[in-house]
Image (cartoon, rainbow, N blue to C red):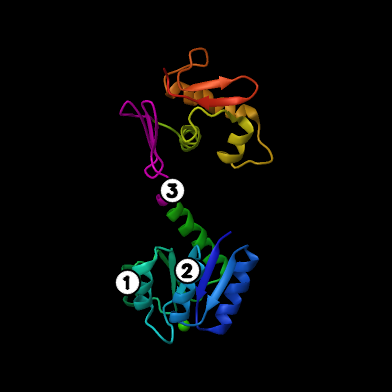
Amino acid sequence: MAEVLLIEDDVTIRTALTRGLRERGHAVSSSGTALDGLRLALGERPDLVVLDLGLPDLDGAEMLRMLRAVSRVPVIVATARDGDADMVPALDAGADDYVVKPFSAAQLDARIRAVLRRVGDSRTDTSVSVGALRLDPRTREASMDGTALDLTPREFDLLHYLCSRPGEVVTKRELLTEVWQLPYGGADKTVDVHLSWLRRKLGETAQRPRYLQTVRGVGVKLVEPT
Ligand code: CA
């Protein structure tokens, strides 16, 4: 799932977390000191760094500042002490999230996935527009000619998916996989129903389509109306 660099000086914790994260599909490299960790962070370019704040050679926040000076890699800091006093400098120094010891590999895995999702969204997803349609996935706002569209979360995802591929024929199977997250099942009818609701909200009908063009027997494509 992700390449994780674990910087933790406690061998027992490091071994347990490495095993636990690997069992969850991550590729894990690890280091017991801040300076070695910094070297690995720059050399191996991991997707995410888990940084213990209590390291023998450098203060965690200090290490984070050094890392931030050269890299934007997402960082989750881990600490044994659960007072704000310890966490605030680390968050100020650019940590994306934190975990308080003791924590399990499962908890850490959930944090890792959440951070990567968030970072991925803000880095790769920007607003898309086709014709008078405009969608912003960060705020989940959709509008046409500047007027807000009242879409359900599913309708938003569906429209966003189609708007990201203007002019491209998308099959119902693909929509079930990508929008409904149903790679192995789900009925085409579900897609049809949502498309018809979406049509209504866009002010068009199947008989008089504008943006949403059905390609019989294949799927649907979103186009800029002429
Ligand atoms: Ca430690």
* Left or right of residue 89, residue 21 in this image: right
State the SS at label 1.
Answer: helix
Query: How far, Cα to Cα, is label 1 from label 3?
Result: 28 Å
Say which quadrant the C terminus sits in: top left
Q: Which residue is mark 3?
A: 124
In the image, residue 21 above or below residue 224: below
Counting from the top left corner in percent of width and height, residue 67 is at 38, 71
Counting from the top left corner in percent of width and height, residue 4 is at 53, 67
In the image, residue 158 above or below residue 74: above
Q: Which residue is mark 2?
A: 49
State the SS at label 3.
Answer: helix
- Callout 3 amino acid: Thr
**Residue 130 counted in the magenta span:** yes
**Residue 125 counted in the magenta span:** yes
Q: Which residue is mark 1?
A: 88
* Left or right of residue 124, residue 25 in this image: right
- Callout 2 amino acid: Val
Residue shown at 56%/78% (left/top)?
14
Task: Point out the stretch of residues depicted in magenta.
Answer: 122-149
Which corner quadrant of the image does residue 219 belong to?
top right
* Left or right of residue 26, residue 199 in this image: left
